[in-house]
Amino acid sequence: MTQSNNNSQTLDLVSIFHYVMAALIFLKGAVAFIFMGIGTIAMAGILSDRPDDMHIGLLAIAMIFFVGPMLFLCLTWTLATLVLLAGKRINKRTNLAYCQIIAGLECVCVPFGTILGIFTLITLTKSQTKEQFDTQIQ
């Protein structure tokens, strides 16, 4: 009984850490707004002395400064949403396979995501944890 209670507390902590990790990933993605702003300013030609006579190279660089960070923002916020959902599912003890897959994806976010992903994978592969996830299905 004590080991089951200890495992339940560990899963609750892992769930909280997933919420924190999702917030950190959201913040990391928000940095892209700065570069998107630079790209917008460059495309508008505000910094150019003659905005009507902008070269195609300047427009290409401006587009790179806008489209690249936009893709980065979409990818990071998608990953943050997936991590947030994994934390919620760990807290509810549902969908073990989804939580394991997201824990593997978290390893991409060096260094905190790697630590959390490995710790989550170790915790989710224990037999007591699998039993807690299985009992929630019934």
Image (cartoon, helix red, strand yellow):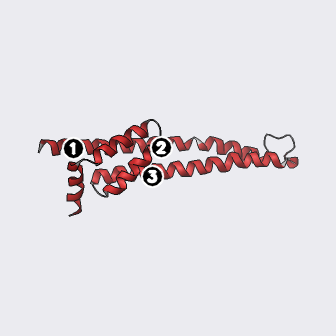
Whole-percent x, y for residue 92 in the image: 28, 54
Label 3, on which residue? 81
**Label 1 sits on what residue type?**
Asn
- Disc 1 is placed on an element classified as helix
Labels 3 & 1 near each other (Cβ < 8 A): no
**Label 3 sits on what residue type?**
Thr
Q: CA distance from mark 3 to mark 1?
A: 25 Å
Extreme-bottom residue of the structure: 138
Whole-percent x, y for residue 81 in the image: 45, 52
On the picture, is 55 further left or further right than 12? right
- Disc 2 is placed on an element classified as loop
| Mark closer to the observer (3, 1) | 1
**Label 2 sits on what residue type?**
Val
Quadrant of res 134:
bottom left
- Disc 3 is placed on an element classified as helix
Whole-percent x, y for residue 21 in the image: 41, 42
Label 2, on which residue? 108
| Mark closer to the observer (2, 1) | 2
- Which tag, 2 or 3, sits closer to the chain's start? 3
Q: Residue at x 81, y 46 (%)?
A: 57
User: What is the quadrant of the N terminus in the image?
Assistant: top left
On the picture, is 63 further left or further right than 69? right
- Crowdedness near tag 1: few (<14), some (14–19) or many (≥20) residues, C-alpha within 10 Å: some
Extreme-left residue of the structure: 1
Q: CA distance from mark 2 to mark 3?
A: 15 Å
Label 1, on which residue? 7
User: What is the quadrant of the C terminus in the image?
Assistant: bottom left
- Which tag, 2 or 1, sits closer to the chain's start? 1
